[in-house]
Image (cartoon, helix red, strand yellow):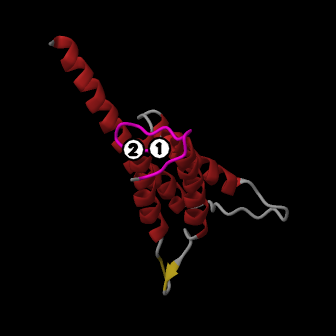
Amino acid sequence: MTSASPDAVETPDGRFAFLDPVILGVLIFDGFLCAVLSVIFLPSYLGTTPFPVSILVAAVFNLGLVIAARTVTTTGKAALPLAGWIAGFLFCMVGGPGGDVLVLSSPLTFLLLVGALAPAIVFLFRVAGKALASIDTSKRS
């Protein structure tokens, strides 16, 4: 026998619905943090060769954040972790007190921007397309 607080609202699938906005907020912060860390580790080297592994890590991490956000919200709001990532990227573009900027003026910066966002955006478009297709087929029936 499990005991829960009387004000806890449990959904039919066993989840606590009041935690969904909190989880989404944590995922948005994780997107922000992912952007800052991927910008910091972008100019990393393996020996004397540039090795921007943070592009791949950011792409996989953002895709995971979007998939996790889809479990607690709708398709439109599932893009909010990407908004957090973009906010973190823009935050890194702002100069510090000494005029130093974390985002470098190099092609790797553009690759980070595109590479980190593209897989998650493609996933969201595919999910939205499937939802529209299912709505369209149900209207035809």
**Magenta stretch in the rendered image:** 2-15
Counting the numbered discs, the total is 2
Q: Nearer the viewer, residue 75 or 107?
A: 75
Q: Is residue 55 left or right of residue 91?
A: left
> x, y (%) of residue 3?
47, 51
- In this picture, is 7 found above or below 136? below
Judge the density around disc 1: few (<14), some (14-19), many (≥20) Cα neighbours within 10 Å: few
Judge the density around disc 2: few (<14), some (14-19), many (≥20) Cα neighbours within 10 Å: few
- In this picture, is 129 found above or below 24? above
Instruction: Check whether the beta carbons of the residues at disc 1 and disc 2 lie within 8 A of each other.
Output: no
What residue is at 77 percent from the left and 57 percent from the top?
95
User: Is 123 covered by the magenta stretch?
Assistant: no
Q: Which residue is mark 1?
A: 16
Q: Is residue 49 left or right of residue 41?
A: left
Q: Residue furthest front?
A: 1
The amino acid type found where label 1 is placed reads: Phe
What residue is at 50 percent from the left and 85 percent from the top?
48
Q: Return the mark for residue 42.
A: none
- In this picture, is 141 found above or below 56? above
Q: Nearer the viewer, residue 45 or 75?
A: 75
- Quarter of the image with the C terminus in it: top left
> x, y (%) of residue 15?
42, 44
Q: Which residue is mark 2?
A: 71
User: Is 9 covered by the magenta stretch?
Assistant: yes
Sequence-wise, the earlier of marks 1 and 2 is 1
Q: Nearer the viewer, residue 115 or 71?
A: 71
